[in-house]
Image: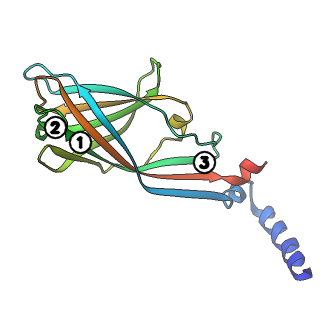
Amino acid sequence: MHSFLRAALLVVPLCLAGCDGKALSSLFFLEVRQERLCKMTYGVEFPGVPLGALEATQTLDFEPPSIPVEEGDGQALLESLRIEVRASSNDAALEGIERVGLFLRPTGSSEEPTSLLELTPGAGEGGVRVFQSDAEPVDVLALLRQGPLELTANVAGQLPESDWTVDVEACASLSVRVNYLARLF
């Protein structure tokens, strides 16, 4: 017991002597990483585009998870995103899609949406198309704290002329890091 108390009395002043508070608080964090967090959405409808048009946009409401972290006390990094799109209407020609851009903003906001990720096509066959992000991780904590969000998908390429419907499975890798020392005091 005495040796523990003696060690604590020696270590704590040494840590505090050379630290400005930020360095010390960076030692007290909790990090949680979820390699595969998936959500399936059925019946996402896109409008048909006139002949020669190269883009279509669809906006969905998104209720983010509650992350009780104050400004500056942590981060939530979206590290990767893989989207699998399945044609649920016969006329959805997915092979013409060349790019998918994802944007977020608070529901009902008139502000410019934040560009989240740009997805490029990968493998696909039989009415299924896979899109994968290869960008740097994006800190989405500030957006997640704003409450309900609008997720807008901007699809570009050779798109169907008539309305088309797809089922979408999105799987993300997310890492959340929280300074728990700041949460205690």
How many other residues sit within 10 Å of disc 1, few (<14), some (14-19) or many (≥20)?
many
First reached walking from the N terminus: tag 1 or tag 3: 3
Residue at 81% across / 72% down in the picture? 11
Q: Secondary structure at mark 3?
A: strand
Q: Amino acid at mark 1?
A: Val
- Cβ–Cβ below 8 Å for labels 1 and 3? no
* Closer to us: 131 or 128: 128
How many other residues sit within 10 Å of disc 2, few (<14), some (14-19) or many (≥20)?
some
- Cβ–Cβ below 8 Å for labels 2 and 1? yes
**Residue 52: image x %, image y %?**
8, 23
Residue under pointer 2: 97
Residue under pointer 1: 85
Q: Secondary structure at mark 2?
A: strand
Of circles 1 and 3, the one toward us is 1
Please give the label number shown on residue 74.
3
Please give the label number shown on residue 157.
none
Q: Amino acid at mark 3?
A: Gly
Residues under labels 1 and 3: Cα distance? 32 Å
Q: Quadrant of residue 68?
A: top right
* Closer to us: 30 or 169: 169
Left or right position of 7 against 153: right
**Residue 6: image x %, image y %?**
89, 77
Left or right position of 62 against 57: right
**Residue 111: image x %, image y %?**
45, 21
Residues under labels 2 and 1: Cα distance? 11 Å
